[in-house]
Image (cartoon, rainbow, N blue to C red):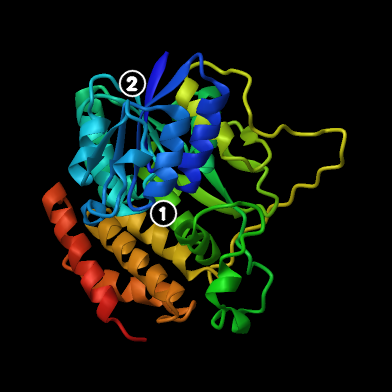
Amino acid sequence: MKRIAVLGSTGSIGTSCLDVLRAQPDTLRPYALTTHRRWTELSAQCRQFQPAVAVISDRSLLSEVDPTAFPPQTELRFGAEAVAEVARHPEVDVVVSAIVGAAGLQGTWAAVEAGKVVALANKETLVVAGPLIMQRARERGAQLLPVDSEHNAIYQCLTAGRSAEVKRIILTASGGPFREWPLEKIASVTPDQALVHPTWNMGPKITIDSATMMNKSLEVIEARWLFDMPVEKISVVIHPQSIVHSMVEYVDGSVISQMSPPDMRLPIQYALTWPDRIVGVARQMDFTQTISLTFHPPDLDRYPSLKLGFEVAERGGTCGAVLNAANEVAVERFLKHELAFGAIPRLCREILSAHQFDASPSLELLMERDRWARQEALRWNS
């Protein structure tokens, strides 16, 4: 029996994770579930799964939450530190890091410090503090297993050869909902249009990132640190069907891919049951039907955010923290109709260019640069 802490259980990744736990009650048991503000959804999850601990990270809800909505055997806690406490708790075997954005860093850091197996769905953790996280994981004996479909695919494909035999890793991208729009129309995209993804069902932040391709920028940076891969060995290809989740090309010309219908429950289950593979709840390929797969290189004029990702992955240091923070604020402002869609990458580039760069930052300095970038992004005008 593996005991699981799901950080961000009410989000899209968290609810998919609970689907996997529901299907494997004899081997996977939720020890703790957390949310930021969606406490009514959390209470419903707790009534079904009966975890030992439930955490609401937003302390401002303390007087609003009805404790009787939670089962008596579930201890209710509040605050970000409570999230970190369950992440490092000795009774937890696997921590699912599914809190969106830089807010997920604290829980992931606590889990790594405690030497846990971390099913990492929060790509921002490695974007902001990749070198520090990977170094601490080595020191503490923590195991990071990627849950992002692309990085999970690469993780699987890398078992086909030795690291010295890898020519490059290839991240696939759907291209988002505007991949065939005329460039002049993209600048006027509305939030409602950008929130409709052609293949994936995700939360609003990740969906907007997919539309701008900032999600792929963040994944390039994440891959740089997670796989210890130089930037020149990382590439991106547009694959609209989202069936090939990523590929690894070896020096002999072999290209190994991981394929499956777009369903996040598969990479989640892989991370939770690793190193074993078991029958699962994810959708299966149907080879009785005709399947067409297409690939084409990304147009950087259409996706200026993608170029930023490669630049930040190459430079490192404080760049990831600044890019991520600026983008988080830019997406929030776009969803509030305060910022045009086409202004998101411009805002990110200008703030990144203006920040005080440090090549070897501490975690404290990264958090300081994060706060600075957020303030600047709130003030920015196109």
The three-letter amino acid code for the residue at tag 1 is Leu
Q: Quadrant of residue 44?
A: top left
The three-letter amino acid code for the residue at tag 2 is Asp
Label 2: element kind = loop
Image side of residue 272 versus residue 109, left or right: right
Mark 2, Cα crowd under 10 Å, few <14 / some 14-19 / many 20+, is many
Q: Inspect this view and state whether residue 121 appears.
A: no
Image side of residue 127 versus residue 344, left or right: left
Give residue 316's position: percent from left, percent from top. Answer: 27, 53
Give residue 31's position: percent from left, percent from top. Answer: 35, 25
Which residue carries the number 2 mark? Answer: 93
Which residue is located at x 55 percent, y 33 percent? Answer: 19
Which residue carries the number 1 mark? Answer: 218
Q: Quadrant of residue 81?
A: top left
Label 1: element kind = helix
Which residue is located at x 18 percent, y 62 percent? Answer: 369
Which residue is located at x 38 percent, y 75 percent? Answer: 333
Q: Quadrant of residue 244?
A: top right
Q: Is residue 261 or residue 80 the one in the foreground?
A: 80
Question: How far is disc 2 from disc 1 in space, using C-alphas?
Answer: 27 Å
Q: Nearer the viewer, mark 2 or mark 1?
A: 2
Give residue 7's position: percent from left, percent from top. Answer: 35, 39
The circle on residue 285 is none
| Image quadrant where one finds the C terminus | bottom left
